[in-house]
Image (cartoon, helix red, strand yellow):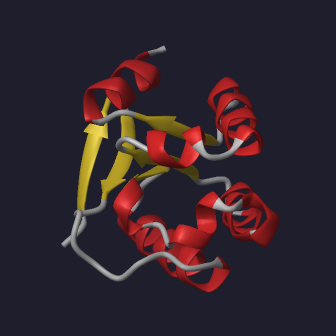
Amino acid sequence: MSALRTIHDVPVLLCPEEGDPIRGEADATGLIGEAGYQGARWVALPAGRLDEEFFRLRTGVAGGIAQKFAQYRMGLAVLGDIARHTAASEALRDFVRECNRGRQLWFVDGLPELEERLRG
């Protein structure tokens, strides 16, 4: 079950490791709705909850999900090690690097790194 936690004055919906996979925009919209209902401004989602297609940029899944979160002005932090995915795709490495420069979608190792990013 997801839990709302305030980190440096930012309400964050912490999603559990277990749960339905996020496969596309419809699943993202459901997650955004849950987060908004609870008053969150960010969603912290374990990388394992994302469908494998998310990490294949040519499918458009990552872009669609990122667009949904941007449209609803909700931040998304993907928590966990995605090294096996980035090792296999230069395009994904570039996407992750660009996202981490912004303020909408971050890829972080875990909650401590998210806490640090939300501090500043």
Visible residue check, residue 8: no
Q: Tell me what residue is drawn at x 56 percent, y 39 percent.
A: 87
- At which x and y percent is residue 12? 36, 48
- At which x and y percent is residue 42? 47, 49
Q: Tell me what residue is drawn at x 23 percent, y 63 percent.
A: 17
Q: Is residue 51 left or right of residue 79?
A: right
Q: How many marks?
A: 0
Q: Nearer the viewer, residue 118 or 49?
A: 49
Q: Nearer the viewer, residue 55 or 2?
A: 55
Q: Nearer the viewer, residue 67 or 57?
A: 57
Q: Is residue 96 left or right of residue 114?
A: right
- Quadrant location, the N terminus: bottom left
Visible residue check, residue 68: yes
- At which x and y percent is residue 35? 43, 65
Q: Tell me what residue is drawn at x 35 percent, y 43 percent.
A: 80
Outermost residue toward the top in this view: 120
Where is 58 relative to 99, above or below? below
Where is 90 relative to 26, above or below? above
- At which x and y percent is residue 118? 44, 26
Q: Tell me what residue is drawn at x 38 percent, y 45 percent.
A: 79
Where is 71 relative to 24, above or below? above
Q: Is residue 3 left or right of residue 96?
A: left
